[in-house]
Image (cartoon, helix red, strand yellow):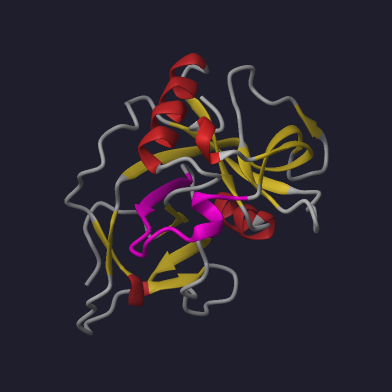
Amino acid sequence: MKSEGLPNVFCWTRFGTEASEPIDAILCRKEGERISNDGVFLWGIGNAIGPSIIELIERALKPEVLFSPIKSSPKCKDVTPAAIATWTSAFALDGSPFDLPTHSLVTSRFDVSAPKRSHYALVCFKDTPLTSLRSQEKLSFSELRNLKTGRPVGASQVTAVVERLESHASDLTRYEVAIRATLVPPYFIRLADPVWRMHCPTRGPAFQ
């Protein structure tokens, strides 16, 4: 059965350790970004969901992104990546250049032997702090369907634009909604021009 108060269509992303940064450090950095940018922060993701974001903003007057902690332990490549990239330029959904907010920083792990040229980010707004990770709101995984295709969300889909369909089946896989934010124009951006450096674990966090 659906949780009351949650939207029926939304962007859902699961978060955990990324580019050697544990989630507490990421949230602390993003909270500073949010404060400095008057509520706006960028959330980096790995998949190109532009068409689904367009569908979402056509169906929702106030499109939301819901954040849930990943249930599994972080992968070795996320904890100790060989290299870490900072993304320095961006493009909106229509392909036009987008000026990254002054206080925003998006990083990702980087494979020097097979370098990728693009990364992606959600453009989010929240007028309250990002630091609270306890919530009574839960998502049933079996109720979620990809918005454009209607297919069930795959276990490997870290970020997806989804619709919740009511189900009376018992679902043991439930995700806490740790953070809710609003997507604001341009909603979703493609990042480019990575500047990377080799990661040295003994130096501590890669970025502050």
Residue drawn at point x = 64 percent, y = 58 percent = 47
- In the foreground, 185 or 97: 97
Image coordinates of residue 207 in percent, x first then y, are: 55, 29
Residue drawn at point x = 39 percent, y = 50 percent = 66
Vertical order, 104 against 3 (above or below): above
Q: Is residue 148 left or right of residue 89?
A: left
Vertical order, 62 against 143 (above or below): above
For the N terminus, the quadrant is bottom left
Image coordinates of residue 203 in percent, x first then y, are: 53, 31
Q: Is residue 157 left or right of residue 165?
A: right
Q: In this view, does 56 lie to the left or right of 34?
A: right
Residue drawn at point x = 59 percent, y = 38 percent = 200
Image coordinates of residue 143 in percent, x first then y, are: 35, 74
Residue drawn at point x = 82 percent, y = 43 percent = 95
Tell whether position 70 is magenta.
yes
- In the foreground, 73 or 37: 73
The residue segment tinted magenta is 63-81
Residue lying at the far left in this picture: please name it. 136
